[in-house]
Amino acid sequence: MTIKYKTIKEIKNMISQKEISNKEIIKEVFDQIQANEHLNAFITLNKEPALKKSEDLDNNPSDLPLAGIPIAQKDLFCTKDLRTTCGSRILNNFIPPYSATVIENLENAGCISIGKTNMDEFAMGSSNETSFFGNVENPWGKNLVPGGSSGGSAAAVSAGIVPAASATDTGGSIRQPASLCGITGLKPTYGRVSRWGMIAFASSLDQAGPMARTAEDCALLLNQMCSHDEKDTTSLDDAIPNFEENLNEPLKDKKIGIVKDLDLSSLDNEVVKVYEDSLKEFEALGASLIDISLPNLSLSVPTYYVVAPAECSSNLSRFDGVKFGRRSEDPNNLEELYIKSRSEGFGDEVKRRILIGSYVLSAGYYDAYYKKAQQVRRLIKNDFDKAFSNIDVIMTPTTRGPAFEMGSKGSDPIQMYLEDLFTISANLAGLPAISIPNGNIDNKPTGIQIIGNFLDESSILNFAHMFQTSTNWHKYTPEGVKE
Ligand code: GLN
């Protein structure tokens, strides 16, 4: 019996049928991590506590909703007594005294945290090449990037090591790696999941969510991740539905918005064809396609690259070598301690963002850049509000193409930033969005993105699940189709 490539739902059944013990599951996970060491998906492992928890479960079976389910945690979430680096040298010795609310919620639901996954430094990147701990390899091919910033989480699920992982998405970091690794990844509505204990990148955009093999598993995970949290002032207090409830609702008479302003001309024909085939599949499931306009969509990437660096420059000022993490050795005075700790501790991409952010927030340029970007952000949000008056969801490709070679975009930051062309607008507007596997080009997976209205994760999960009941793309693995 193996749990490789199994879904949470399947593993839950295996446990309840006593086909496998909790300890066997966790042992297999660590064997798989070792067998896949070349992927470099993990930064820190949680082996002994995880094994202990599985033994306890074997001795005292539990009926918690996710009892015994192994989960990999992105190394951006603080985990009590377990090193949390955020992919950065400056935090390479940081052991948090508390766990993020998301981690607590998942563990309280019975999940077993396996370890911390590799990621772009402070979640800035789209290829996992900015991590201090080295690149992550995409299980679909040697030298292919897994996407980023949640590259380690995506690779661990894609390789079948774990059925699920936690991740975060500021401009696309759940959906883009999910797409490049052939798995399902969901970014919830801003405020749905508590940000408490998440190391902040851009606080008005950051949101945690699940990565798994299916939309159904994402619903199971989201049910447990969400909670109103007084420790996060942006945490929403709205009712949290049971996200499993509407999964099987027929799509007949439902409406999909197709963005007519979206320029697909820069995409490969094959990418466009895969996308259009998926839309036909949704039509066959009963949904209809409606043209919509999001006239300010083309401004999302430039808007994001003002707002996100501005917030990051402010958030990252707390890393000064004094309060958290690594301190430079032998500075001559206090100022040098700050300068050296930050110069040695941060990588190039993080420094670039801090510089841009400090510039756009500076007294002389604030109105021209930061204020303007906030105004455009509002226009983008208004466009979505208008569009959603007449449709259920919006669809776009998730990315401009499948996984690319390591090193191929590193020298041109703009090319890297355009990786999130289709994903960033959902963060700017605070909307939920999911990426699901929808095709395969030269044995590399592709994804389609489904964006929902504010707080309407249920609809995007419904569309995603129905697609997965009528197609097999989510069953493709780097080793062939799983049955
Ligand atoms: N790739 C984008 C960036 O580098 C988004 C990252 C993210 O969502 N964390 O900012």
Image (spheres, rainbow, N blue to C red):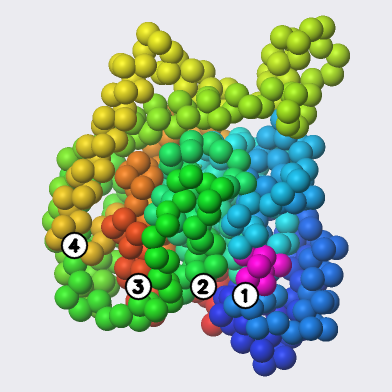
From which residue to which does the magenta span run?
106-112
Q: How far apart are marks 2 and 3 (CA)?
A: 13 Å
Q: Which residue is drawn at 40% across and 70% down?
A: 241
Of the residues under marks 2 and 3, which one precedes in the sequence? 2
**Residue for badge 2:** 220
Mark 3 Cα shell of 10 Å, populated few (<14), some (14-19), many (≥20): many
Q: Give the amino acid type for the residue marked by disc 4 in the picture.
A: Ile
Residue 73 position in % (x across, y down):
65, 56
Left or right position of 347 against 417: right
Q: Which residue is drawn at 79% across and 66% down?
A: 50
Q: Residue at x 21, y 50 (%)?
A: 385
Between label 2 and label 3, give the one nearer the viewer. 2
Quadrant position of residue 164 = bottom right
Q: Distance between the residues labelled 4 and 3?
A: 14 Å
**Residue for badge 4:** 391
Please, is residue 116 above or below residue 477 in the view?
Answer: above
Q: Do the residues labelled 2 and 3 touch (CB within 8 Å)?
A: no
228 vs 110, nearest the viewer: 228
Residue 383 position in % (x across, y down):
19, 45
Of the residues under marks 4 and 3, which one precedes in the sequence? 4
